[in-house]
Image (cartoon, rainbow, N blue to C red):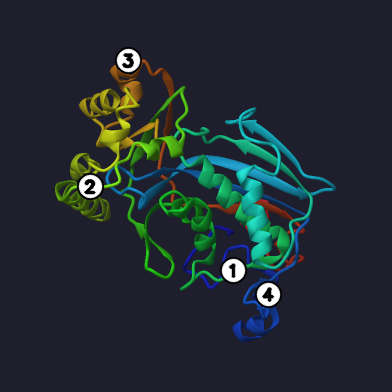
């Protein structure tokens, strides 16, 4: 399974053809002098990356959750750069070398000492563009992953998390890229030397109900409204709630999530420009949601419910009514958190080893 996991010695794009040799032989034969794990270069690869919801209230630039909405991309060696986008962001995202995916792919090739060849990119986007659901991070992660597979190189993970370092160098913080890479809820921090991420428990049966306004939200604009200085009471407010959030998730204490997702560092400031934020959050809570918060830099609002509570947005029309009254019509995604992060759906040549090793996925043999 080509999911990106820290529990193994290298990224999931490592070669399976080496699986029949001993670990010591594999190290001698497949680790180059540069420290990369050499594999067979690929002619094409199809990758999938999930949407992500950052901050989860108080965990500003720190906590994020992978959501079961996916972008897929097929990259094929070509004689010139071609980019085709279908679905979310079609006609809006750049289709030249200024595209963030291309930037990430160039970084992946450069990191392993290669120059990016001409490529054809075919993007199937289901993650809403510029709505606070990690479309940029999905582009970064898909570009890095596809570039590494095509280049025939893998990276060390355990104790290094090199892939995460590369993604954070582009994004600037781990709250979206970490769950996009690893899946689940990830808590990210910088040790002073490198980025580090840690998985947080997802209680069973959680649903994610996402209200997505028609208007877009630009991260740089949303960050511009944030103050340069904070007070001690604001800091204590968020520290206590971030700790409560992680503790509540790890102990399956769903009743505390309403308070654990409250925030004083960014939501009040961003709410000035998002007139729908408070009305929709309040309506969701009144309708029975466990919690509701501004997803990432907005403008989307994510409410979490348990299977017992049902999906609050379809049960009660007042949530959508609250948004429309605030002048923010939109749509609703009913989905759930996903433990799965970025992975390879298909590659040519195949990762399966001529009949000896078969890697099965829901899409067939990879």
Toward the viewer: 359 or 171? Answer: 171
Residue pointed to by mark 2: 230
Q: Picture coordinates of residue 172 (x, y %)?
A: 46, 53
Residue pointed to by mark 1: 155
The residue at 40%/31% (across/down) is 300
SS at badge 2: loop
SS at badge 4: helix
Report the Cα–Cα distance between label 1 and label 4.
15 Å
Report the Cα–Cα distance between label 4 and label 2.
53 Å
Q: Residues within 10 Å of mark 3 (few under 14, many from 20)?
A: some
Residue pointed to by mark 3: 321
Report the Cα–Cα distance between label 3 and label 4.
57 Å
Q: In the figure, 282 relative to 13: above or below?
A: above
Q: In the figure, 164 relative to 135: above or below?
A: below
Q: Picture coordinates of residue 216 (x, y %)?
A: 47, 28
The residue at 74%/56% (across/down) is 116
Nearest-to-viewer mark from 1 and 4: 1
Nearest-to-viewer mark from 2 and 1: 2
Q: Would residue 265 be visible to someone looking at this image?
A: yes
The N terminus lies in quadrant:
bottom right
Q: Would residue 148 be visible to someone looking at this image?
A: no
Q: Picture coordinates of residue 289 (x, y %)?
A: 26, 32
Residue pointed to by mark 4: 18
Q: Is residue 233 left or right of residue 222?
A: left
Q: Earlier in the sequence, mark 4 or mark 2?
A: 4
């Amino acid at each position: 399974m080509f999911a990106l996991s820290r529990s193994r010695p290298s990224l999931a794009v490592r070669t399976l053809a080496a699986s029949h040799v001993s670990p010591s032989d594999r190290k001698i034969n497949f680790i180059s002098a540069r420290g990369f794990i050499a594999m067979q270069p690929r002619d094409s690869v199809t990758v999938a990356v999930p949407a992500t919801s950052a901050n989860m209230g108080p965990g500003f630039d720190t906590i994020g959750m992978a959501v079961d909405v996916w972008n897929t991309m097929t990259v094929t060696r070509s004689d010139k750069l071609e980019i085709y986008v279908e679905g979310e962001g079609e006609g809006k995202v750049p289709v030249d070398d200024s595209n963030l995916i291309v930037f990430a792919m160039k970084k992946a090739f450069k990191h392993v000492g290669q120059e990016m060849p001409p490529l054809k990119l075919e993007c199937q986007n289901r993650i809403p563009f510029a709505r606070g659901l990690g479309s940029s991070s999905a582009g970064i992660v898909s570009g890095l992953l596809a570039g590494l597979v095509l280049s025939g190189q893998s990276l060390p993970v355990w104790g290094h998390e090199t892939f995460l370092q590369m993604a954070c160098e582009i994004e600037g913080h781990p709250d979206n890229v970490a769950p996009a890479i690893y899946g689940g809820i990830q808590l990210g921090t910088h040790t002073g030397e490198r980025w580090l991420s840690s998985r947080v428990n997802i209680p069973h049966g959680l649903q994610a109900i996402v209200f997505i306004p028609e208007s877009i939200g630009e991260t740089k604009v949303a960050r511009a409204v944030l103050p340069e200085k904070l007070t001690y009471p604001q800091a204590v407010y968020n520290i206590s709630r971030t700790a409560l959030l992680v503790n509540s998730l790890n102990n399956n204490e769903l009743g505390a999530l309403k308070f654990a997702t409250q925030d004083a560092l960014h939501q009040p400031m961003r709410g000035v420009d998002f007139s729908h934020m408070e009305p929709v959050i309040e309506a969701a809570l009144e309708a029975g949601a466990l919690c509701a918060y501004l997803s990432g830099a907005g403008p989307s609002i994510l409410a979490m419910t348990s299977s017992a509570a049902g999906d609050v947005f379809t049960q009660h029309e007042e949530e959508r009514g609250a948004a429309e009254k605030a002048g923010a019509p939109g749509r609703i995604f009913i989905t759930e958190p996903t433990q799965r992060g970025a992975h390879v759906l298909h590659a040519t040549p195949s990762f399966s080893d001529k009949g000896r090793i078969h890697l099965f996925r829901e899409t067939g043999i990879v």
